[in-house]
Image (spheres, grey):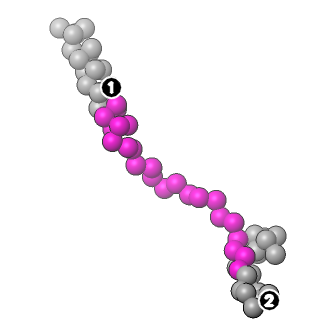
Amino acid sequence: MAEVANSEGVTVELERDGAIVRVMPYQPPQMLSQKMSREERAEAELARWLANENRGSRGV
């Protein structure tokens, strides 16, 4: 069943012993745009600030 669902890209549904069994095609998760966590944003901002501080102290 899973092979048919995956190869054809369809959902296979059947009834067995009064229960409906649904086999859906596997689709790997897609990451469109991952948002940065608060900690990651803070670390990125700190790195940017430190880079600006270092650039300023060397150039002046």
Can you tell which mark lies on residue 47? 1
Q: Is residue 19 magenta?
A: no
Mark 2: secondary structure: loop
Residue at image location 40% in from the left, 49% down from the top:
35
The residue located at (76%, 87%) in the rendering is: 14
Location of residue 4 with respect to 42 vertically, above or below? below
Residue 38, located in which quarter of the rendered image? top left
Q: Is residue 25 magenta?
A: yes
Q: Main secondary structure of the magenta part?
A: loop
**Span of residues in magenta:** 22-44
* Residue drawn at 59 percent across, 58 percent down: 29
Residue 17 bears which disc, if any? 2
Seen in the picture, residue 20 relative to 36 is either above or below; the reply is below
Question: What is the three-letter code of the residue carrying label 2?
Answer: Asp
x and y percent of residue 40 in the render?
38, 37
Residue 39 pos. (x, y %): 35, 37
Residue 30 picture quarter: bottom right
Residue 57 visible within the image: yes
Question: Front-most of 33 and 3?
Answer: 3
Q: Earlier in the sequence, mark 1 or mark 2?
A: 2
- Residue sitting at the far front: 17
Q: Classify 10 Å Cα crowding around label 2: few (below 14), some (14-19), many (20 and above).
A: few
**Front-most of residues 46 and 23:** 23
Quadrant in the picture for the C terminus: top left
Q: Classify 10 Å Cα crowding around label 1: few (below 14), some (14-19), many (20 and above).
A: few
Report whether residue 10 is seen: no
Residue at the left extreme of this rendering:
60
